[in-house]
């Protein structure tokens, strides 16, 4: 095949590279359109990942709105022993002075406060369980989120004590800008 002429090179949109100096015209193709297309695709993908994750977070908020849904859920496995112990203390308090509990006096108010605290802790544990399970499912369905930082967030959440768990959001992968 004959070597391309200067006219052919100009028509193809390429530029000769005088640095090569081989006597054979070097052709450098203009890849800027390809790079722009890839950049736009990466930006579009990153935007869609954010939209998908925000939709997921809004769906979790909707699940929290219905208290009946949360009431039917299980508490976190890590919280069960603590909640059972708290319930045992309440029952022990009632059995030690049943008359004080039934009479409706100060003992009754104290026990009712403990029961309200137990219910609050159980509801918080159930909400934490919902949050943790939903995030784990989202994490496993989206392998691009499998980073050390996200894995650490995922694994440390259930290890935090009840009442001090901080909800987290995943760090979504960044976008490489080649432009």
Image: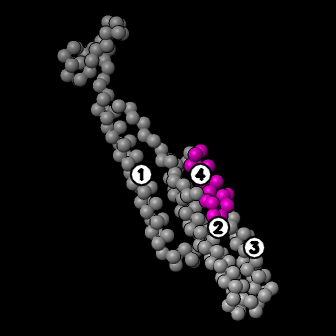
Secondary element type, mark 4: helix
Q: Quadrant of the C terminus?
A: top left
Q: Which residue is label 1 attached to?
A: 50
Rounded to the nearest whole Å, what is the CA distance between mark 1 and mark 4?
Answer: 18 Å
The residue nearer to you, when weighing 103 against 178, is 103
Q: Which residue is label 4 attached to?
A: 153
Rounded to the nearest whole Å, what is the CA distance between mark 3 and mark 4?
Answer: 28 Å
Q: Give the image location of residue 36, x and y in percent.
A: 31, 35
Say whether marks 3 and 1 touch (CB < 8 Å): no
Which-is-in-front pick, marks 3 and 1?
Answer: 3
Toward which corner of the image does residue 30 lie, by quadrant? top left
Q: Is residue 5 left or right of residue 110?
A: left
Say whether marks 2 and 1 touch (CB < 8 Å): no
Secondary element type, mark 3: helix
Residue name at image x 61 percent, y 73 percent: 120
Q: Give the image location of residue 51, x and y in percent.
A: 39, 54
Q: Badge 3, how many Cα within 10 Å: few under 14, some, many 20+?
A: few
Say whether marks 3 and 4 touch (CB < 8 Å): no
Q: Earlier in the sequence, mark 3 or mark 4?
A: 3
């Amino acid at each position: 095949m004959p070597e391309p002429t200067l006219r052919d090179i100009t028509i193809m949109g390429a530029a000769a590279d005088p640095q090569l100096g081989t006597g054979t015209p070097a052709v450098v193709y203009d890849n800027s359109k390809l790079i722009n297309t890839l950049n736009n695709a990466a930006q579009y993908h990153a935007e869609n990942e954010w939209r998908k994750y925000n939709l997921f977070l809004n769906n979790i908020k909707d699940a929290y709105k219905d208290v009946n849904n949360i009431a039917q859920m299980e508490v976190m496995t890590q919280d069960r022993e603590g909640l059972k112990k708290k319930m045992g203390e309440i029952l022990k308090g009632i059995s030690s002075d049943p008359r004080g509990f039934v009479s409706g006096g100060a003992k009754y108010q104290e026990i009712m406060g403990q029961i309200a605290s137990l219910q609050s802790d159980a509801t918080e544990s159930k909400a934490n369980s919902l949050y943790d399970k939903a995030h784990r499912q989202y994490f496993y369905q989206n392998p691009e989120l499998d980073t050390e930082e996200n894995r650490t967030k995922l694994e440390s959440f259930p290890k935090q004590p009840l009442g001090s768990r901080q909800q987290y959001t995943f760090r979504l992968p960044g976008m490489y800008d080649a432009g």
